[in-house]
Amino acid sequence: MAHIEFRTEQQEAVFHSPLENMQEVKQHLEVRFDPLTGRQSVFNSAMEGKAKTAFPDTDFDYLEQRAKKTEKECFLCPRDWKKYTPKYPEELVPTGILEKGETALFPNLFPIAPYHSLIRVGDKHLRTLDDFPPDVLADAFELALEFVRLCYAYDPGMRYATINANYQLPAGASVIHPHFQILSSPLTSTHHDLILQKSAEYWEHNSTNYWQDLVSTEKELGQRWIGQTGQAHWITAFSPMGQNEIMVVWPQKQSFMHWTREDVWDLAAGMSHVFKVWYEMKLSSFNFSCFSAPLDEESPYFSCIMRLVNRQNVVPDHRTDDYFLQKLMHNDMIINRPERLAQWMGEGFPST
């Protein structure tokens, strides 16, 4: 039996509002706690219908102008991109870089881990979120898995790996051209360490895997359940870490060492759909991180998970959506209720 609590606390803010002729208004607040970590996010019901104040729609004309302006200087664009990319030592990657279809993997020029790779996701300099075909995504993720395994075989101390992305400048990307990033390290990031630790504690207390329990509970409740592609289960996060967070859970896959080609294609199919729905919501920017158990051990307490979140849309003079609440307090603000987001995502979701 699952031991998962979807905890909320109800609060109220009372003040005289100039938007209501200085009448007294009451705004309802709902604080949500992540069932595993306790991390908080807060939803203000008054934000419904006013989300564009904090999260304006993408200015697609401006986005295209930015893309045209930067394309000529883009080192990832097709003309002669290989001239400007670093290469790995032959003993790690015999060809220096890994290639599959339009995608390619090579070292990051400014690494933040001992092995920090960049994946060029296709030839196109600009892709709106309705233009990430599953085959291009699958090729990119296949390269990521190939490198993680090559790296671990070459240097077994690199027992922790994540697959990540910053897409578009508001998400922290330094270039517009789509690209993913792989970090292989002897150390975990702070969040990676936290979820491994909390998952192990849940296993010790309940003798079950938290992520398997989460999937079965969310599927039964149906409020945040989106669908399933193969062994990948898609849900909206109860207490999101960012805007419109989508979680992917592989209950039977402890680490990247257990993934198959089918898992990659199942991920690509679901991700392509998520991006298309985000595009329909007039969104343009995202981050994701995919987490694995340690590559060198059996970890029945953990399952691979991915978190995908939106960042501020591309508009002239955009404001950031990441400030003291997220950076220093490690809380977040909810603009779209996860239950409503699950309904949007569930429409036409692919089943494989």
Image: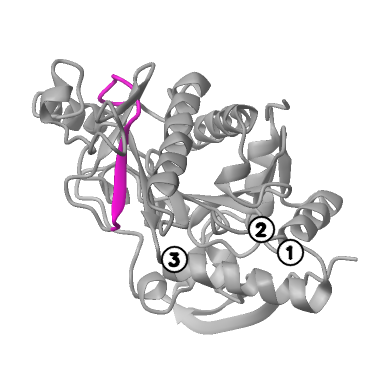
Mark before the other along the chain sequence, 3 or 1: 3
Left or right: residue 277 compared with residue 84: right
In this picture, is 229 found above or below 297? above
Q: Nearer the viewer, residue 208 or 158?
A: 158
Mark 1, residue position = 210
Disc number lying in front (3 or 1): 3
Asked if residue 5 lies left or right of residue 247, the reply is right
How was this image coloured?
one colour
Q: Amino acid at mark 1?
A: Tyr
The three-letter code of the residue at mark 3 reads Thr
Q: Is residue 308 visible?
A: yes
241 relative position to 52: left or right: right
- The residue where tag 3 is placed is 188
Between disc 1 and disc 2, whose residue precedes? 1
In what element is the residue under mark 3? loop
Q: Residue furthest front?
A: 91
Towards the viewer: 3 or 21 = 3
Image quarter (top left, top right, bottom left or bottom right) of the C terminus: top right
Task: From the image, state whether disc 1 or disc 2 is nearer to you.
Answer: 2
The span from disc 1 to disc 2 (Cα, nearest Å) is: 16 Å
Circle 1: element type: helix
Gap in angstroms between the C-alphas marked 3 and 2? 17 Å
Q: Quadrant of the N terminus?
A: bottom right
Residue named by callout 2: 298
**Would you say residue 115 sits in the magenta stretch?**
yes
**Separation of disc 3 and disc 1 at Cα?**
20 Å
Q: Measuring 61% from the left and 82% from the top, which residue is drawn there?
A: 12
Q: Which residues are magenta?
A: 113-126
